[in-house]
Image (spheres, grey):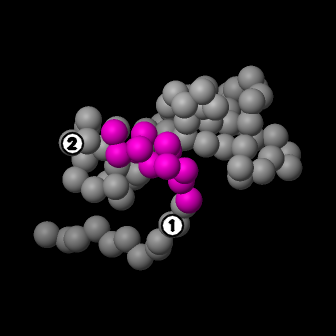
């Protein structure tokens, strides 16, 4: 059996609320680790259609896991422009 090699590391910063949303999703979906949960969410996001397009010059702080009202959302920069 060949083991999947993961040689690259990705570090992200999350707010307390974003981390709690990730942990809630992880436990609801019985994911074995945070890393597995993040990989699954990335896989789903990359397969999804209708995501927000970043505008030229958009800042990282404009993209989050949860909406301003605390609900889990699509993040984004507030633009209604959708990817095609």
Residue depicted at 45% across the width and 49% down the height:
19
Q: Residue furthest top?
A: 80
Tell me the element at label 2: loop
Task: Judge left or right: residue 65 versus residue 79.
Answer: left
Within the magenta stretch, is there residue 30? no
Magenta region includes residue 15: yes
Residue at the image point whose x is 22% and y is 71% from the top: 3
Task: Work out which residue is located at the far left of the displayed protein and give it.
Answer: 1
Residue 43 shows in this picture: no
Q: In this view, does 5 lie above or below 46?
A: below
Residue 76: tell me if it is visible: yes
Kindly report the secondary structure that dominates the magenta region of the rendered protein: helix
Disc 2 to disc 1: CB gap under 8 Å: no
| Classed neighbour count for the residue bearing mark 2: other residues with Cα under 10 Å, few (<14), some (14–19), many (≥20) | few
Residue 12 shown left or right of residue 53 in the figure: left
Pointer 2 residue: 30
Residue 10 is tagged as 1
- 28 vs 35: above or below: above
Q: Residue 77's spot in the image, x, y percent?
A: 74, 36
User: What segment carries the magenta color?
Assistant: 13-24
From mark 2 to mark 1, how far is it between C-alphas? 22 Å
Instruction: Place residue 22 in its image quadrant.
Output: top left
Q: Around disc 1, counting alpha carbons within 10 Å, would you say few (fewer than 14), some (14 to 19), or many (20 or more)?
A: few
Residue 9 placement, left or right of 56: left
**Left or right: where 71 falls relative to 41:** right
């Amino acid at each position: 059996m060949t083991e999947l090699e993961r040689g690259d590391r990705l570090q992200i910063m999350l707010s307390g609320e974003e981390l709690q949303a990730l942990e809630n999703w992880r436990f609801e979906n019985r994911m074995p680790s945070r890393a597995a949960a993040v990989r699954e969410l990335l896989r789903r996001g990359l397969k999804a259609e209708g995501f927000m397009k970043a505008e030229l010059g958009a800042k990282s702080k404009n993209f989050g896991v949860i909406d301003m009202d605390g609900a889990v959302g699509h993040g984004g920069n507030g633009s209604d422009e959708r990817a095609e």
